Image (spheres, rainbow, N blue to C red):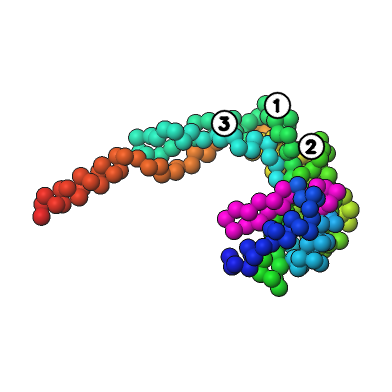
Amino acid sequence: MTDANSDGLAGRLQAHFGARLLGLAEARGETTIELAPGDWASAGRELRDAFGFEQLVDLCGVDYLGYGEGEWDVADVSAEGFSRGVEGIAGPGRFRWEDRPAAATAPRRYAVVAHLLSVSRNQRLRIRCFAPDDALPVVPSLCEVWPGVNWFEREAFDLYGVVFEGHPDLRRILTDYGFIGHPFRKDFPLIGNVEVRYDPEKGRVVYEPVTSVEPRVGVPRVVRDDARFETARAESVARRAAGD
């Protein structure tokens, strides 16, 4: 990251967009702005033409259901000094479909985030837009501003169910034909809703409700600070010193 990324970009954005900016943040040398759906495409065009962000590097969807809620037990440690995820079974995606969390727990659930690059000015910018309706999240397409975003928007539509208004060919890009649901939504179970197998009697592939996989949680091993390690190290140093 060079100084060019922090040479008053935030101030110029604030002066240019004014009240159209719903949020502006600078953290760790990165600038992020939030825009309303009605300003999403027009602001993108202005960022390209007036600010020199000629390239859209990436675009993705975000599901804020359960945002900020921890699911791992990090207060305690085991005898080996590793934390254990005892609460993970209730976390996002780790449940049966009939017990999925309610979408109403997040006031603004779905968002679209894009990362812009100005090659000529060596600057980067993150822009974000929340969909106004969680039941049917709709955000204007940026294809007319940056044509290369076409497949990124299709991916966000496929995985998160965000509809990009004005997209020239909005259809799934990763999941199978006839796939039901959007697998990156946090109320979609990690084991999925259906499983696929070949039925020799019917002579074709059939879809059936998931029965062979149980909801489960993988337990990561994260080394935590433990006084016992410091004690053992000090005792080792003392023994070596005594031996000398």
Amino acid tagged 1? Glu
Q: Amino acid at mark 2?
A: Asp
Identity, as a three-letter code, of the amino acid under mark 3: Ile
Q: State the residue position of label 1.
A: 98
36 or 207, nearer to the observer = 36
Looking at the image, tell me whether mark 3 or mark 2 is earlier in sequence order: 3
**Percent position of residue 18, x then y:** 79, 53
Q: Residue at x 48, y 42 (%)?
A: 220
> Measuring 49% from the left and 38% from the top, which residue is drawn there?
219
Which one is in front in this view, the residue at disc 1 or the one at disc 2?
A: 2
Q: Quadrant of residue 229?
A: top left
Left or right: residue 83 versus residue 189 is left
143, above or below 239, in the image: below
Label 1 CA crowd tier, 10 Å (few <14, some 14–19, many 20+): few
Tell me the distance, in whole angstroms, between the alpha carbons under discs 1 and 2: 20 Å
- How much space separates mark 3 and mark 2, taking CA atoms? 25 Å
Q: Secondary structure at mark 2?
A: loop
Q: Is residue 103 above or below residue 233?
A: above
Determine if the magenta segment contains residue 27: yes
* Residue annotated with mark 2: 134
Name the residue carrying label 3: 89
Q: Residue furthest bottom?
A: 120
Picture quadrant where residue 45 is located: bottom right
* Number of numbered markers: 3
Give 7 or 53, whichever is nearer the viewer: 7
Circle 2 crowding by C-alpha within 10 Å: few under 14, some 14–19, many from 20: some
- Disc 3 vs disc 2: Cβ atoms closer than 8 Å? no
